[in-house]
Amino acid sequence: MVDVSERGARFTIEDHTVHLALAHGTVLSYTIKTPYGSSECTGKIAWARLIDGLDNWGVAFTELSSDEKDPLRCLIDNPF
């Protein structure tokens, strides 16, 4: 995960030999590891493209915990 906000996240695979076929609108379930622990969420692929030869894609969250103790929520709410 490269970046995250309340609305979604950007992901990249840092291996030039791995390429995914991600279709716009596909809904995926994620387990995201954060410094606070792991969290489950669901998101829809908003875009996918190669950037500097690496697969990158943006996800618009469709299900995200509202529990302030959820690890992903803690990461999003962290001011740093």
Image: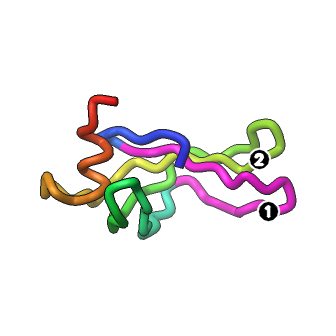
Could you give the CA–CA distance between mark 1 and mark 2, rounded to whole angstroms? Answer: 8 Å
38 to the left or right of 19: left
Q: Which residue is rendered at x = 28% and y = 57% of the image?
A: 71
Mark 1, other Cα within 10 Å: few <14 / some 14–19 / many ≥20: few
| Contact check, label 1 and label 2, Cβ < 8 Å | no
The quarter holding residue 2 reads top right
Spot occupied by residue 5 in the image (x, y as percentages of width and height): 35, 38
Spot occupied by residue 62 in the image (x, y as percentages of width and height): 31, 56
**For the residue marked with disc 2, what is the amino acid?**
Leu
- Identify which residue, 6 or 28, lies in the foreground: 6
- Identify which residue, 50 or 39, lies in the foreground: 39
Which residue is tagged 2? 54
2 to the left or right of 34: right
Mark 2, other Cα within 10 Å: few <14 / some 14–19 / many ≥20: some
Q: Which residues are magenta?
A: 8-24
**Is residue 15 shown in magenta?**
yes
Q: Main secondary structure of the magenta part?
A: loop
Q: Which residue is rendered at x = 43% and y = 56% of the image?
A: 44
* Quarter of the picture holding the C terminus: top left
Spot occupied by residue 19 in the image (x, y as percentages of width and height): 77, 60
**Is residue 21 shown in magenta?**
yes
Residue 39 numbered mark, or none: none
Q: Which residue is rendered at x = 43% and y = 62% of the image?
A: 32
Which colouring convention does the figure follow? rainbow
30 to the left or right of 37: right
Q: Nearer the N terminus, badge 1 or badge 2?
A: 1
Q: Secondary structure at mark 1?
A: loop
Spot occupied by residue 14 in the image (x, y as percentages of width and height): 73, 52
Q: Which residue is rendered at x = 57% and y = 49% of the image?
A: 11
Which residue is tagged 1? 18
**For the residue marked with disc 1, what is the amino acid?**
Val
